[in-house]
Image: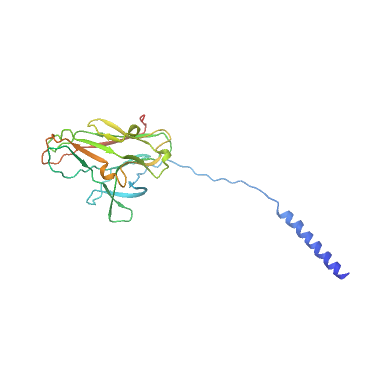
Amino acid sequence: MKKNLVCLSSLLVLGGSIGMLSVQAEEASYTSQGSVTFEQDTSKTDPVDPLNPDKPVIPTDPDGNEIPDKGTAGPLSLDFASDFLFGTQKITTTDQDYYAKLQSYKKEGETTLSTGPNYIQVTDKRGTQLGWSLSVTQQEQFKTADEEVLEGAVIAFNNATAVSSVDSAYAPTINAGGATELKLVPGSQQPVMTAAEKQGMGTWLYRLGDETTADKSVKLSIPGKSVKLAKEYTTTLTWTLASTPTNP
């Protein structure tokens, strides 16, 4: 009889435990919120590595001298444009093609120079998805300091791509529809990169070449019949960024 009483007591306790578990399984709910608001960034954007566009760099000339910062500030900015340096060449009477030196730069935290493709950098931090257009004008033909003209000289861009750390689905259009070569015409404004509505957000590079083609992507062609003096010839390229895109 004592043994039965012990067993019964155990069953009563277990039954009580089951009742308590049932009460603890009841649930309650409460909602809370998370929010974030963005505003336009009007600060300047640093130039980035043309081969690794999520990393900032300090552009230099081929000798390692830092290039003066001429980038614009604001939510839609033109951050950087390479100079095209074709070096010192021998005077010749045959047609010749010369290629611009690679862009030199210092990576963050490094003192040694790196080189990569020449490029032009645009940043859109407006948060409007309205698009933009980038164009270039070669102001005049190559000339010496005393106005001697290098007749027939033509700058051509090859292997151009739109490069960014942003998803390629938002990439701008290159060379007004993707022409493989763009020849500059002195005095004529020519589109090079166009972001339609809902394109071009973030930082984008008009990059001329990649690891294997960069050294042949900015070409200067000079006819053999052109008179060449033993002097330096220069020209000016003006890059224009407009908030209203042109039709590609």
In the displayed orientation, state which residue is furthest to the right: 1
| Residue 86: percent from left, percent from top | 20, 43
In the displayed orientation, state which residue is furthest to the front: 94
Residue sitting at 26 percent across and 45 percent down? 215
| Residue 139: percent from left, percent from top | 22, 33
Residue 180 or residue 161, whichever sits in front: 180
Q: Quadrant of residue 218?
A: top left
Number of numbered labels in the structure image = 0
Residue 132 visible in the snapshot: yes
Q: How is the image coloured?
A: rainbow
In the displayed orientation, state which residue is furthest to the bottom: 2
| Residue 56: percent from left, percent from top | 34, 49
Residue 126 visible in the snapshot: no
In the displayed orientation, state which residue is furthest to the top: 247
| Residue 62: percent from left, percent from top | 23, 49
Residue sitting at 28 percent across and 38 percent down? 158
Residue sitting at 39 percent across and 34 percent down? 131
Residue 211 or residue 28, whichever sits in front: 211
Q: Is residue 85 shown above or below 152?
A: below
Q: Quadrant of residue 240?
A: top left
Q: Quadrant of the N terminus?
A: bottom right
Q: Is residue 4 shown above or below 194?
A: below
Q: Quadrant of the C terminus?
A: top left
Residue 240 or residue 168, whichever sits in front: 168
